[in-house]
Image (cartoon, rainbow, N blue to C red):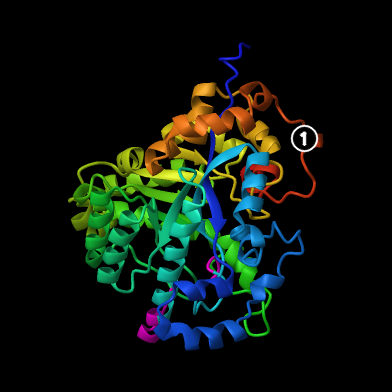
Amino acid sequence: MSEIQDEPYVLISADTHAGADILDYKAYLASSWHEEFDEWAGSFTDAWGLLDEADEESKVGPSSFGSSVNWDTPKRREHLENQGIVGEVVFPNTVPPFYPSGVISAPGPRTQDEYDRRWAGVKAHNRWLVDFCAEMPGRRAGIAQLFLYDADDAVKEVHWAKEHGLAGVLLPADHLLKMENLYYPRFDRVWEACADLGMPVHRHVIVPSEAASEESGDAAPAVGRHEAYWYGQRPLTHLILAGVFDRFPKLRFVTTESLAQWVVPHLAALDLYCESAMDSSTLTSFYAGPAVAKLKRKPSEYFATNCYLGSFFNRGDIDARHDIGVDRLMWGADYPHHEGTYPYTMEALRVDFAGVSQEDVRMMTSGTAADVYGFDLANLREIANEVGPRPSQVDVPLPRDQWPTDSVCPTLTTDWRDLVKSVS
């Protein structure tokens, strides 16, 4: 293979996590909140923090909020470049002011009083994120947090985020304690702002439950883990059946950390559902006919133009890439989470991409993310030439007996989805 043919991949992780240390958020809050913040921060505890006994710098998502790599740019840069990663899409990870638990495990606000406080906290995080991204210009695409409790507030924050260089917005995830129905017409003003400003909208999969406790019992995280992917798939149906992509054809929607194979049968079922809804003799038509009659295209066609899947994948996802749409997939490391690819990114890349064409690998590891988030590939190329993995290194199958035994990343383990597939 020639040097040109073996040009290093420009790895952009479409899924990383960061946030300020709790006390560092105070500087980004209005002074009127400072006294209350001191009281809250002094008493904050989170049962999820005891979940993972892994290294302090790499814990399972809900328990990773205290790791210093969330905010320590020199350490973080060293870790990522050691893995060959030169660009990152940054989702939240720590504990914004007045949250009841870490951002990855908390439900959305349920009362006006809770919303007022947590909205102040979310805005503090977004302002911290602008400064964090500025520490590595051109290499971080920050994703601003939103709540949908007040759509007018959300629209203002979308405009603020765009004006200050952030690259997209994150909607609150569904949670067993607080669901978010994205089909409500009142949210059109949010979709319109995001479409007009070129701000992709995200849902990031979480474990949608409480931690185990005397009150919740041991079943809480078990149920949350089992239902996590289902909750992650839910918003795609909401946006499609509500006709959001017809009204706002420039809107981009990204589901992050949901794996990918599920979308093929999911879209096939939605297509069939809509076809049935157009038959007036069916029960489906009774319920869905009015909404489906307004749609201009099939659900699978909306996905092919407006929707993306990001984060780590397993080999089954990659093998299904042309059924999914190879240009719909954006690889990510999920750094610094224990369930991400760190510190075994090369091994994960070999599992996913050995035998896959360079064209497809480059699209999934940088091309699509550069288009969605505005990364300058020419600038990132200079760094990738020094640290990026070469195709000749990635295009080597990883024997099963060489898979790391201390990784819980679905790329490098037999996850429950593989077990279900093997007995179906």
Residue type (three-letter) at the residue carrying disc 1: Arg
Q: Is residue 109 located in the magenta-colored stretch of the structure?
A: yes
Which residue: 61% across, 11% down?
2
Residue 230 makes an appearance in the image? yes
Which residue: 45% across, 40% down?
264
Q: Position of residue 298 (x, y in %)?
A: 28, 42
Identify residue for label 1: 400
Query: In this picture, is 70 found above or below 383?
Result: below
Which residue: 63% across, 54% down?
336
- In the figure, is residue 44 to the left or right of 234? right
Q: Is residue 28 located in the magenta-colored stretch of the structure?
A: no
Residue situated furthest top in the rendering: 2
Q: Which residues are magenta?
A: 103-116
Q: Position of residue 357 (x, y in %)?
A: 54, 22
Q: Quadrant of residue 275?
A: top left
The residue carrying pointer 1 sits among few (fewer than 14), some (14 to 19) or many (20 or more) residues within 10 Å by Cα, namely few
Residue 107 makes an appearance in the image? no
| Numbered circles on residues, count | 1
Q: Position of residue 220 (x, y in %)?
A: 62, 73
- In the figure, is residue 194 to the left or right of 50? left
Which residue: 24% across, 41% down?
297
Q: Secondary structure at mark 1?
A: helix
Front residue of this view, candidates 138 and 347: 138
Front residue of this view, candidates 301 and 165: 165
Quarter the N terminus occupies? top right
Q: Position of residue 144 (x, y in %)?
A: 41, 60
Query: In this picture, is 351 found above or below 77?
Result: above
Front residue of this view, candidates 289 and 383: 383
Quarter the C terminus occupies? top right
